[in-house]
Amino acid sequence: MEILGLSTSPSSGGAYALILSETGGNRRLPIIIGTFEAQAIALELESIKPPRPMTHDLLKNLLLSFDAEVQKVLINDLNEGTFFAQIHYKNNGENIELDARPSDAIALAIRFNAPIFVNTKVLDEAGIETEETTPGQQPSVSEEGDSSKEMTKLEEIEQELQMAIETENYEKAAKLRDQIKKLKG
């Protein structure tokens, strides 16, 4: 996965959506994170060095002082809307996995230039498809050929989801994705 960016909305109460994008694929994974974590990630992405080390910089320096290095980060589970992650690091030739919040794991991963992975099950459950539609493309016509029929509730929500993705409102997109999954049963 690659970090696509950070997004916020006035209704999020100060939270941010960290958007991961599937490398070589068309799915995005929005993860809601706090302001501090968003700042830690944004500063590193923009190569801005604060005058004093932030927590994730301190953790990096601590790991390096023990000759340890982050190898990769894995977002490995989603339980009741909460994402779980593991930091995989190497210390004295031993591979070690450490439980972490995804935001902290990703903040460390970018400091170590380590790859970010997401378990397929998690991506299937919470990922958002981003297949682009051609501008001006009309919704498909029903089998009877009657385009004047009202769209079904599912079609309306799917159209709304596409609009949310295009406007990068990933928090709304995640909620719409969940509604679609419920409707599809």
Image (cartoon, rainbow, N blue to C red):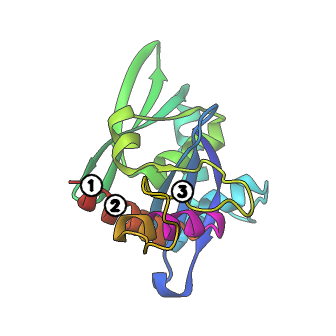
Disc number at residue 180?
Answer: 2
Asked if the residue under mark 2 is in contact with the one under mark 1, i.e. CB atoms within 8 Å, the reply is yes
Q: Amino acid at mark 1?
A: Lys
User: Is 74 left or right of 112, judged from the image as shown?
Assistant: left
Which residue is labeled 1 in the image?
Answer: 184
Would residue 105 be seen by someone viewing this image from the given angle? yes
Disc number at residue 140?
Answer: 3
From the top left corner, tell me how far across and down residue 183 is, in percent.
Answer: 26, 61
Viewer-side residue, 137 vs 107: 137
At a point 66% along the width and 51% down the height, the residue shown is 132
Mark with earlier residue (2, 3): 3
Part of the protein shown in magenta: 158-168
Q: Secondary structure at mark 2?
A: helix
Q: Give the vertical position of 71 relative to 106 (above or below).
A: above
Q: Give the vertical position of 43 relative to 20 (above or below).
A: below
From the top left corner, tell me how far across and down residue 133 is, in percent.
Answer: 66, 54
Q: Is residue 159 magenta?
A: yes
Quarter placement of the C terminus:
bottom left
User: Is 22 left or right of 86, judged from the image as shown?
Assistant: right
Mark with earlier residue (1, 3): 3
Of the residues tagged 1 and 3, which is closer to the observer? Answer: 3
At a point 59% along the width and 41% down the height, the residue shown is 26
Q: Main secondary structure of the magenta part?
A: helix
